[in-house]
Structures are given as structure tokens and as C-alpha cells.
Image (cartoon, rainbow, N blue to C red):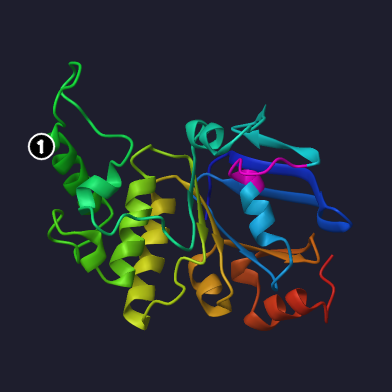
Amino acid sequence: MTFGKKVLELDTIDKTFGAVNALSGIQLSIRAGEVVALVGDNGAGKSTLVKIAAGVIPPDQGSILFNDEAVIFRGPMDATKAGIAVIYQDLALCDNLSVVSNLFLGREIVNGIPLAPLNEEQMEAKVLDLLQELNVGQIRDIDIKVGNLSGGQRQTIAIARSLIGEPKVVLLDEPTAALGVAQKVEVLKLIRRLADRGIGVLVISHNISEVLEVSDRVVVLRLGKVVANFETKDITSDDVVSAITGSKSFN
């Protein structure tokens, strides 16, 4: 499979919390249209790495390159403006608001004059177009409150919301956690559709079978270091588990 150029690269990233070396010499890149899975045991450094990429915390050493240009994120808004969207495990949805209101929360379209009412017709049309483009058929009522949706539908809304800002990279933290089998299948299909749009995708997951199904490449962290960088087509679940546990070296 052919991918585009590197859209996000973390180059020699170090991060220390007190006496704990959370990350050491991390090298990780994501290309346009590529799904990269980031796996590792609890405490391996996955969440810390995502927080650095998302501008939540700064690295102690190393650099972040976006579209081949060095960038400094002083906060999450800098990362968002650059083109990085993050979907955390809690989804951060407002249950008492509709699908449309959740997608445009903080980015509402108004009619162009001070104190003007929201342009609900334009927002609804954009939501319908986006859901149709993502082939999301299970959400038919965009005025329904998000609190009334299933877990899989809520994950879909969180992913769709991230696309309103037209990001170049989407980071997903355990996107199928607590979902039923059928819902997991739909979310995995949606992740592949993001890549088909030319978006670089980073997925954190503990589910090895899902990782092998959805990813193009698997990066394994162990004790804050990258211990393996696999092409998914070349490996088995045993290879991933061996790298995670350290029972076999792949470097």
C-alpha cells in the first residue's frame, strides 16, 4: 500500500517525571493515509507520548515535526490549529446536546452579524454530508441527544466531530473499549475510512487482534522505549506480544 508524506514525526523524544524516565529517545512517524497502532503494557509510555503529540505536555528533549516543519506546541490549541485532533477514551461529549450541537460545539456557524442566531440549517447540512461521507448509516436522527445513543454511535460522533476542523492527523485512545462486537466492527471500519480520506491515524489499543485488523504498522513501546516497529502484514499476534513482554528482541 502506498501512503503520502510524513504528516507527523516525533524525533528523539525524552520525557522525565521526577526520577521516572517515561520516554527515552522515541522515534515515531505517521504518514498521510496510514493507520499506526501504538501498543504496550500499562506504564509503557503510550499516554505520555500522545499527550506530547497533542500539545498537552512538552517534551524534555527532542522535536515534533508537522508536515516536515519543526513545531512547538504550547498547549492543545496549538496542536489543534496545526491539524492534530485527539479523541480520548472518555470522548468528552455533552450528553444533553444533540448530534449537531456536539459536532459544532465551540465552532458554531453564525449568520455573519454580531449577536446573530446560529445558522442551524448550514450546520445540519454539513453534519449530514459528513456522516454520509463516512458511511455512517446507523445515526439517522441528528437532532437526538447524544446521551440516548449507543456506545458505538457515541464513538462515531466523537470521530466525526474531530473532522469538523479538517485535521491531518487523528489520535485515538482505546476507541473500541467497552463496545460490543458489532459496534467494534463499525468503529474499525470508520478508522479505515479516515485513512482513506488521506488522514494519518494513530490508534492506542490493548486489543491485539483489532490492532492487526485495522493498522498498517504497529509500534511497540516497552518501559518508555520503542522496541519494535512492525509492518502489520509481516507479523502475527505472537510477535506483538513477544515485543510487549520483552521475551524476544526485534531491534
Residue on which disc 1 sits:
121
Seen at 78% across and 51% down, the residue is: 26
Seen at 31% across and 34% down, the residue is: 107
**Rendered location of residue 192, percent (x, y):** 41, 60
Q: Is residue 147 left or right of residue 5?
A: left
| Residues rendered magenta in the picture | 52-59
Q: Amino acid at mark 1?
A: Glu
Quadrant (top left/top right/bottom left/bottom right) for the C terminus? bottom right
Could you tell me how many numbered marks the image carries? 1
Q: Nearer the viewer, residue 106 or 165?
A: 106
For the view shown, which residue lies furthest in the right direction?
19
**Rendered location of residue 201, percent (x, y):** 51, 52
**Rendered location of residue 224, percent (x, y):** 79, 61
Prevailing secondary structure of the magenta residues: loop
Q: Nearer the viewer, residue 249 or 145?
A: 145
Seen at 85% across and 73% down, the residue is: 249
